[in-house]
Image (cartoon, rainbow, N blue to C red):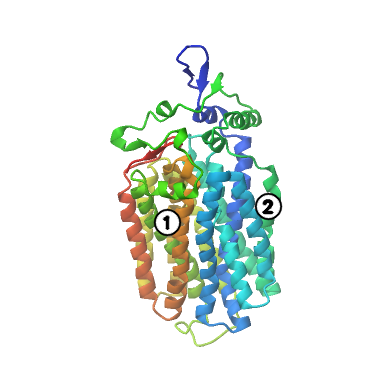
Amino acid sequence: MNPQVVDSDGSEPVYTLDEALSAAGFGKFQALVLAYAGLGAMAEAMEVMILSFIGPFVKAEWGLSSGQESLTTTMVFAGMLIGAYFWGFLSDNYGRRVGLLSVAVVTSIFAFFSALSPNYVLLILFRMVVGIGLGGGPVYSTWFLEFVPVQNRGIWMVIFSTFWTVGTILEASLAWIVIPRLGWRWLLAVSSAPCFAAFVLYFFTIETPRYLYMHGKIGDAHDVLKKMATVNKTELPSGELVSEKMSNLNEDFTPSEGTLLLHNRKQETKSGHSSIFTLFSPSLVKTTLLLWVVYFGNSFSYYGVVLMTSELSSEESKCHTSSHPDLLTDSSLYINVFITSLAELPGLVLSAILVDKIGRKMSMLVMYLCGFICLLPLIFRQQQVVAISILFGARMFIIGNYTVAGIYCPELYPTSVRTTGAGVANAVGRVAGMICPLVAVELVSGCHQMAAITLFEIAILLSGISVLFFPIETKGRKLSDTVTLNI
């Protein structure tokens, strides 16, 4: 039965957005939303994974130094740093669909242009703009999240995350097939196809009811909810959808849990500066800073493992051999990256099992511990088979943490700054991505593997400590709109 609330005059039952979402349920409508948001996540993963493959070939073709090779990766993450905040601001202030369209247009056009780059300068310029588009990843996850009822939300967000893993595996497979036969340019061109698909399918998307509800467009929100119920073959509660029932809607939040009513409708603003300042308000500043540490550590360790797989697989490294075989015929790079990409599948299964059973915080702590232990043997140089096996295990736990943090972060922030909060946290993660090539590529290729692994372990340790200081568990909680956490 769907709970209803009667107006003070006793005349007509009313219901809230979360009650409507629960009544509409998770069905065919959300499956379609999941498919589109997942396509965006898959496209992002493919464009990021390209960095594991094209660097050595661009270096060989244009005679680049190791530093210039690393810069092709760093510039992408620099773009993602810019895009992560910009798309979050755009999405929170002008609508999720505006963010979806902008991201799709920028990413698809410049991903294809990258394949046509006549020189190194234009390549890194185009890849940086692609990175700006890829910074819109939180727009896809937030858009999907706001259609999902609270029941089993964690599991559905893990399922959404599987599209990223599908993208990494698909890219590794494409690289294995395309590069030896057609070269790195064709890999860039073919890999841009999902970005173009996201642009074409954008015209079938719809604005989230939560965004409409938050901005006072109750009639539009009701129309979307009605469409959801129709497609899912369910019914909305009888009565009227109301916009103001925050105290009842969030009655499970108590002062002892540190909740605070931030503002009422009259105080809301569409100012971008207001959004960023809200993240540093007394009620959110601790949450924001701790999330930044977690996202930095997750990105640093994840991309570190991905790039280290490429470096440890390369037979060009003077630490392994003095020979210089043809990169186009050596398949060890593709095989090892493909194998370690498969590690994300059990990592996602593990996070799906844990996230709604033991909660977000405990899930992250368990996987940080396991990931830390996995990487320890790599402080000392191992045989390639052993090293790849260790990286397989480490990547499994790291992607699990990445996934749970991606669920936890937007659940913590209210609707008014949800995409901005997640975007800025992702932007901090992109800073880690910019630094990572200097560690994974430069240190490992320079025979300083112990120093590289030590830095990754420190990042994991600090992230785990940060999770300990989160006092709020979001498992089973409704998403907040004008309520935020005073922690």
Q: What residue occupies the far top of the structure in this picture?
A: 10
Callout 1: helix, strand or loop?
helix
Residue 93: give x, y in percent of width and height.
54, 45
Q: Nearer the viewer, residue 470 or 16?
A: 16
Please tell me whether residue 256 is drawn above or below residue 352 in the rendered image: above
Q: What residue occupies the far left of the structure in this picture?
A: 256
Please tell me whether residue 428 is drawn above or below residue 162 in the rendered image: below
Residue at image position (46%, 50%) is: 273
Residue type at the position of mark 1: Tyr
Residue at image position (52%, 30%) is: 17
Q: Mark 1 highlights which residue?
A: 295
Residue type at the position of mark 2: Phe
The answer to whether 380 appears left or right of 323 in the picture is left
Placement of the C terminus among the 4 image quadrants: top left
The CA distance from mark 1 to mark 2 is 28 Å
From this viewpoint, is residue 147 visible? no
Q: Mark 2 highlights which residue?
A: 199
Please tell me whether residue 415 is drawn above or below residue 104 in the rendered image: above
Q: Nearer the viewer, residue 185 or 275?
A: 275
Q: Nearer the viewer, residue 169 or 411?
A: 411
Residue 38: give x, y in percent of width and height.
59, 49
Callout 2: helix, strand or loop?
helix
Q: What residue occupies the far bottom of the structure in this picture?
A: 322
Instruction: Check disc 1: other Cα within 10 Å, few if <14, some if 14-19, many if 20+.
Output: many
